Image: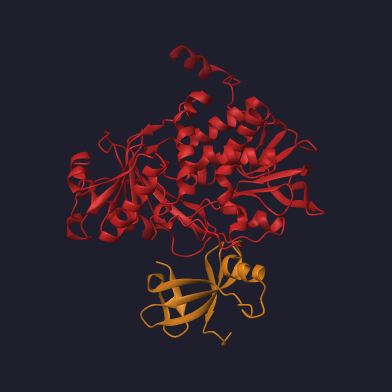
């Protein structure tokens, strides 16, 4: 069983979590051009490597950030947004 | 034959002809370099040579042919898709498959079985009526059938799923649905391409792509540099690594997709059975094994590993449908990479990098498309313009917000 550490609830089974995709920065919608906006909406990193991701602990309703190696499936650390 | 086999066994130098040559030397230049020796890349090499007379082609494969998605899928072939663009494309592929064993002179174990997509809810039935209507409009054999028809055609199925799942209310029935031996498709295309003049280089990794003035100039490999004006990337789950080499961004995200086979037994399941609600698809191969797959793993990962959770979950859903399998053992399980697009359609055709052609976004639906993908990409590379059947699948559709939504037909994970 794979275990993920929720920053609020500690180590829990991966079954309790939902994956929320990579952490991305939204460009200013008022200032961004069409190409930049389309890139933000659709394009993703895709390549394996260490990346920051959103995860959600379902029973407690906690969104948090995990740094994970998407080639080895190793979670390096997890923290609440803004508390890195 | 036994005498020939005996002679072969006693021989010292194994004189049996190989399926294709293994050229020792990588040349300095080729007209076209194809990255990826799966069914798509090999088919493209075959059609480039046979349909367009372009024989100066190198297929570069980092491992061995068919190592990726080609040898890891569940080998289902069908065309009952949801959009006109999708259904037309996959129907062309089914057409090519029907005649492929004869054309390539190789037994692909192509076997038409009939394909059932089970509906466990009124909402699922509604999507299936939609699919049937689109399919019939395009001349594709597809209809919605009721419980009686399913029970008559697949007598072993438990339509009420033992009370563990919502009962089956009907199904989308697609008689042309078929299975084939996926390795044989790769081998046959490899042999065809090789005989037509293309070179297949296994154990050759691409490490970079040279772009000069917005156009492809060559490919760096771990065996040296190749000058070429045209590169076709047909690497599915490894596409993001290749598109980075030419500075292209794509919407692809890579998830593992797992499958398993059971021990072989006597033929009893003729149909291909799919349940979207149970995230399960099952067919019986020519060897007698049940081949079954599930939905995507729930988070991104570029690793072809398989998990106990998957085998446990899939076995449970198989028993919901077929309680008679309770004593059957799992023989082996594996994982492959699915490069998923947001609209569940592939990304094919020209790109804004001159001479760089993309055949990607094959997610969970790539095997059935192999012949059509090879055929249309060969056309695209030769004519330097998208084949009419794949215009809707160009990477630029995302910048135009003009997607081809196939989620209701391409995948079981919804």
Left or right of B257? Residue B290 is left
Residue B77 in the image, given as x and y percentages of width and height: 42, 40
Left or right of A45? Residue B120 is left
Left or right of B102? Residue B328 is left
Visible residue check, residue A59: yes
Q: What is the image's colouring?
A: by chain
Q: Residue at x 63, y 25 (%)?
A: B195
The chain assigned the colour red in the figure is B
Q: Which quadrant of the structure image shows residue B168?
A: bottom left
Q: Residue at x 45, y 40 (%)?
A: B91
Residue A5 in the image, given as x and y percentages of width and height: 46, 78
State the quadrant of the N terminus of chain A: bottom left
Q: Which quadrant of the structure image shows residue A9?
A: bottom left
Residue B281 in the image, given as x and y percentages of width and height: 34, 49
Nearer to the camera, A57 or B1: A57
User: In the rendered image of this protein, which colour is used for chain A?
Assistant: orange
State the quadrant of the C terminus of chain A: bottom right
Residue B295 in the image, given as x and y percentages of width and height: 40, 56
Up-down relation of residue B146 to residue A28 (above or below)? above
């Amino acid at each position: 069983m794979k275990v993920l550490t929720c920053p609020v609830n500690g180590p829990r089974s991966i079954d309790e979590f939902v994956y929320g995709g990579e952490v991305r920065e939204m460009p200013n919608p008022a200032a961004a051009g069409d190409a930049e906006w389309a890139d933000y909406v659709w394009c993703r990193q895709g390549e394996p490597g260490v990346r920051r991701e959103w995860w959600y602990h379902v029973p407690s309703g906690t969104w948090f950030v995990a740094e994970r190696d998407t080639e080895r499936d190793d979670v390096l650390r997890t923290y609440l947004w803004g508390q890195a | 034959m036994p005498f020939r086999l005996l002679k072969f066994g006693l021989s010292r130098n194994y004189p049996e002809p190989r399926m294709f040559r293994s050229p020792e030397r990588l040349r300095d230049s080729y007209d076209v370099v194809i990255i990826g020796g799966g069914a798509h890349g090999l088919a493209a090499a075959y059609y480039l040579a046979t349909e367009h007379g372009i024989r100066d082609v190198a297929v570069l494969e980092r491992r061995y042919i068919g190592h990726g998605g080609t040898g890891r899928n569940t080998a289902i072939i069908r065309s009952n898709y949801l959009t006109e663009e999708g259904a037309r494309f996959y129907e062309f592929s089914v057409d090519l498959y029907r005649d492929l064993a004869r054309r390539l002179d190789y037994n692909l174990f192509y076997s038409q079985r009939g394909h059932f997509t089970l509906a466990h809810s009124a909402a699922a039935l509604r999507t299936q009526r939609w699919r049937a209507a689109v399919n019939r409009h395009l001349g594709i054999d597809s209809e919605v059938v009721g419980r009686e028809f399913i029970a008559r055609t697949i007598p072993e199925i438990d339509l009420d799923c033992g009370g563990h799942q919502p009962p089956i209310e009907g199904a989308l029935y697609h008689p042309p649905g078929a299975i084939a031996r996926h390795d044989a498709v790769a081998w046959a295309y490899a042999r065809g391409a090789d005989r037509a003049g293309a070179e297949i280089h296994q154990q050759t990794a691409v490490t970079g792509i040279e772009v000069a003035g917005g156009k492809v100039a060559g490919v760096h490999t771990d065996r040296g540099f190749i000058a070429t004006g045209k590169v076709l990337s047909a690497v599915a789950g490894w596409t993001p690594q290749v598109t980075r080499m030419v500075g292209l961004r794509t919407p692809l995200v890579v998830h593992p997709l797992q499958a398993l086979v059971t021990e072989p037994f006597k033929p009893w399941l003729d149909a291909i059975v799919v349940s979207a609600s149970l995230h399960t698809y099952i067919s019986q191969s020519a060897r007698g094994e049940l081949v079954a797959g599930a939905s995507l793993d729930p988070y991104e990962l570029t690793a072809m590993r398989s998990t106990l959770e998957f085998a446990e979950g899939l076995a449970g859903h198989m028993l919901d449908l077929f309680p008679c399998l309770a004593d059957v053992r799992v023989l082996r399980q594996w994982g492959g990479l699915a490069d998923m697009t947001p609209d569940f359609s592939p990304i094919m055709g020209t790109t804004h990098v001159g001479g760089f052609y993309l055949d990607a976004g094959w997610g969970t639906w790539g095997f059935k498309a192999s012949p059509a993908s090879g055929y249309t990409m060969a056309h695209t590379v030769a004519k330097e313009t998208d084949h009419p059947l794949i215009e809707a699948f160009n990477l630029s559709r995302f910048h135009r917000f003009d997607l081809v939504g196939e989620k209701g037909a391409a995948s079981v994970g919804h």
